[in-house]
Image: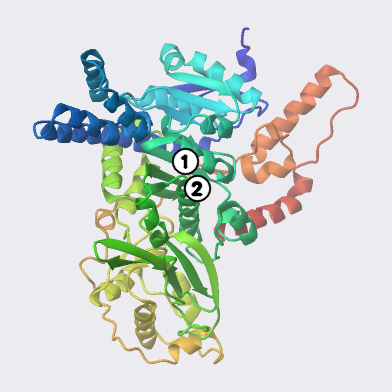
Amino acid sequence: MEIDLNDYTVIKEGEAEILMHKKNKVFFNKAQVNNRDMSIAVLRAYISKRKQEHEAMLSKRARSTGKMPEKNVSSEISREETPIENGETNEEHEETSQDGPNEAVKTTYESARRELKPPRVLEALSASGLRALRYAREVEGIGQVVALDNDPASVEACQRNIKFNGLMSTSKVESHLTDARVHMLTNPKEFDVVDLDPYGAPSIFLDSAVQSVADGGLLMCTATDMAVLCGANGEVCYSKYGSYPLKGKYCHEMALRILLASIESHANRYKRYIVPVLSVQMDFYVRVFVRVYTSASAMKNTPLKLSYVYQCIGCDSFHLQSVGRSLPRNNSVRYQAGVGPVVPQDCTHCGKKYNMGGPIWSAPIHDQEWVTSVLNGVKSMKDRYPAYDKICSVLTTISEELLDVPLFLSLHSLSGTLKCTSPSAAMFRSAVMNAKYRVSGSHVNPLGIKTDAPMEIVWDIMRCWVKNHPVKAQPPEHPGSVILSKEPSLQADFSRHVGSLSKAQVKKVARFLPNPEKHWGPKIRAGRQITSKHVSLIGHEAVNDHLNGHKEAGTEGGGGEEEKEDDITEAEPDLKRQKKTEDIASTS
């Protein structure tokens, strides 16, 4: 069947090209180039890391070979290595080793054991197939890429784009019309990399995804339902992810931690657990990269990685309470429930009540070694990343974050509580560091401040600042008045500390970039008719072009009455109200 190219637009991204139908039949969002570039960078780092781990394992086996009989070595290889590479159980290989395979089988097994197969990748929701094609064409050492979708139009478009990209894509990428959940459930531990990037919440795919990833494999997951994750509909978030969100300034980082906690919960049901290597909040979504392992004993540490959050409704104070704790017991460890509550009924700073949210992932959300490796890899291949500036700035900021400090404070919000002028970020960071505490920025918010200083110290620093920068009197019951009524127990030192600016700030490296163009954000779901209501998403020009195109088509067809659409100018009041609602949701 020949393709009429007049009906399609050729879109090039990286080394891949796709044909997009002009009638919005298959979903595509240009803004997700940041997501795809970041995924490719992490995938390259994973393949390199996987190879290093395999070589280290072979080296370890080689050293142990001279110390034990051949039979024992074969048995040990069966128990320890094969589950990671082939997804088979220990019991199966124990039976094989006890049967005593002949020399020919041993030789074949040894050669297969030493060969590291290219990683298989599953893109569970492929749409146009652009992501799968970029993986196949741009990531060296990658194996088969399986692209799935349950929409016939998307699968047809994906298969068309595979052919359009030539022989390499045809040999490496395969597209199937199927439910991703069913495919992942029927292929347990079959894929070294599983990529979930749905339109909205990924919650319905998590249970099958954690079963489909091989031991030590990589799960990449995106969530775009930020209004839900950031507290606009807390009950919906709890039903989808099992955590209750809070509307703090840190809500976008909390969204990351809620998603990680949900993935861990699904993994634990199958004696598996996750290790986050990179967690990113960009544009209008969150994206996490985690490795999945199987271990019934390591899984017991999960309650130590989860915490509830107490957020004061009067000031910015928040406190975390661990879900569980561990106690040493002879040569083992005993696990118990966490001790609490960590806060009294009323806030000790302003006297207001607390809201409680969570549980969230309170362990580190990044691996510093991975972040450094990914960042160096991106810098060494600058020309191969269309969104190089954006992902480099995000990774640079992440590399300077405090890994063991969950959530963050907003300097402007602290000042707003006290109704005072805000100190500069450098001055505040200097005061924290002069008090012998650590402090860093956050990749989520340019005004975010991560610190291990307790809230008592933070408010003491702000009290000292207000003494030098007096404020107007507020009602005595106002949270700021209650906080300022107490004398500081710490005399803050605002003199410039040598570490008050990060290395990136000293070198004037861009860390927070503006959107490259207007309407850079979420797009209309595929198949929906574009109307004047979609101006805030795609702009006046795009909507007008589409509506005019429909009118011309109706006139040429001569098929009865001309289709009528609301004029853009008449819809302006509704559009303004809609945009205001969207802005509130995006900043909440």
Q: Looking at the image, which residue is at 29% across and 82% down?
A: 492
Residue projecting furthest to the right: 560
Secondary structure of the residue carrying tag 2 is helix
Res. 121 image quadrant: top left
Query: Horizontal placement of 41 versus 27: left or right?
Result: left
Disc 1 target residue: 210
Asked if residue 551 can be seen in this view, the reply is yes
Could you tell me which residue is drawn at 26 percent across and 80 percent down?
A: 493
What residue did someone put label 2 on? Answer: 266
| Residue located 29% across and 23% down the image | 99
Percent position of residue 33, x then y: 46, 36
Task: Say above or below: 564 vs 110.
Answer: below
Relative to residue 273, is residue 555 drawn left or right?
Answer: right
Image coordinates of residue 588 in percent, x first then y, are 57, 61
Cα distance in 3D space between marks 1 and 2: 7 Å
Nearer to us in this view, 96 or 394: 96
Name the outermost residue toward the left.
Answer: 66
Q: Residue at x 71, y 36 (%)?
A: 530
User: Disc 1 marks which amino acid?
Assistant: Val
Can residue 9 be seen in this snapshot? Answer: no
Q: Outermost residue toward the front?
A: 99
User: In terms of sequence position, does the residue under pointer 1 or pointer 2 come before the other?
Assistant: 1
Instruction: Please say if 1 is above or below 222.
Output: above
Kindly identify the amino acid type of the residue bearing the numbered disc 2.
His
